[in-house]
Amino acid sequence: MPMIRNVRTKLLDIAYHESGPPDGLPVILLHGWPSDPHDWDGIAPALANGGCRVLVPWLRGYGPTRFLDPSTPRSGQQAALGSDVRDYMDALNIRQALLVGYDWGGRGACVAAALWPERVRGLVSITGYNIQNIPASGRPGAAAQEHRYWYQWYFQTERGRAGLQQNRRDICRLLWRLWSPNWQFDNATFDATAESFDNPDFVDVTIQSYRHRYANAPGDPTLDPLEVRLAERPPITVPAIVLHGACDGVGPAEQSETHARFFTARYERRVIPVAGHFLSRETPDAVVQAVRDLLA
């Protein structure tokens, strides 16, 4: 694993790994919840060896990444995740990058691609168009999907906050198993990532994220203008490949079947057999190939 580097944005001291030639085309790999840069262990070396400058940050609330100011809202809302991607690129003087992400990282990547397309060379989005439809969040879903989101309903309560604070590793390990049922990860694999959940802001950022998406928590006021734009479900106008694990236990593959309408440039959707939610760990070759295809 490359050594940890740090860069400061206006809000964060972001920890990240970097590999590959410094003058290579930047590729930013963005992890999900609950996970960390180990999501990309099977992907970063192949891209770096192919000549890309590969950057793998810890998101806000994870691992060594820290807020600079105690008064900054510990927000995990989608506008914050997207703004962090842009600010990270600014801090590293990166004009344009190819973005790859899933779950929270995929949301940040989609937000950045939709709001600042001039900064995005291409997008690999695992599970599709990840921008939340917060104005419609009060509409109930199918019973099976509501069941899959049990943890989100749990986090709406103070009991859920206390449970995440007290049992974060047990909850996260359970979700790994439920979301990627065919992935037989061992204790060492989980423990290496679970250290990132010890970040002092992990619980606050997580709880705000899951409450904000259902309009049950206020957002960071400085991000209100961006949330207004995101509420309009803006299209993604950069070349994109969507990957979706056929056995994703939280967001089934059929969810992305209708997402093509949100993409106006080159678009392709690939369903990956056997893979679940942690597709980048289970089938890293599929991610590497998608990046290479966008760069071709």
Image (cartoon, rainbow, N blue to C red):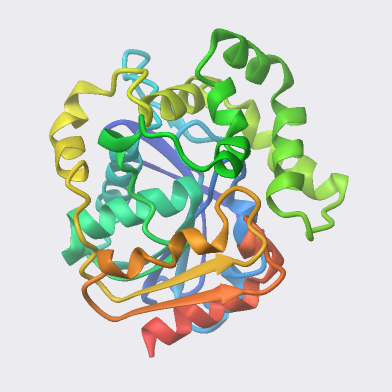
Image quarter of residue 248: bottom right
Q: Is residue 41 above or below residue 197?
A: below
Label count reads 0
Answer with left or right where residue 94 lies relative to residue 194: left
Q: Is residue 29 visible?
A: no
Q: Is residue 239 above or below residue 170?
A: below
The quadrant of the image that shows the N terminus is bottom right
Q: Is residue 242 visible?
A: yes
Q: Position of residue 291 (x, y in %)?
A: 46, 78
**Residue at point 35%, 34% (across, down):** 137
**Residue at point 51%, 69% (across, down):** 243
**Residue at point 40%, 35% (across, down):** 13
Q: Position of residue 124 (x, y in %)?
A: 42, 68
The quadrant of the image that shows the C terminus is bottom left
Answer with left or right where residue 121 lies relative to residue 58: left
Residue lying farthest to the front in this orientation: 143
Q: Position of residue 97 (x, y in %)?
A: 32, 67
Q: Position of residue 237 (x, y in %)?
A: 20, 69
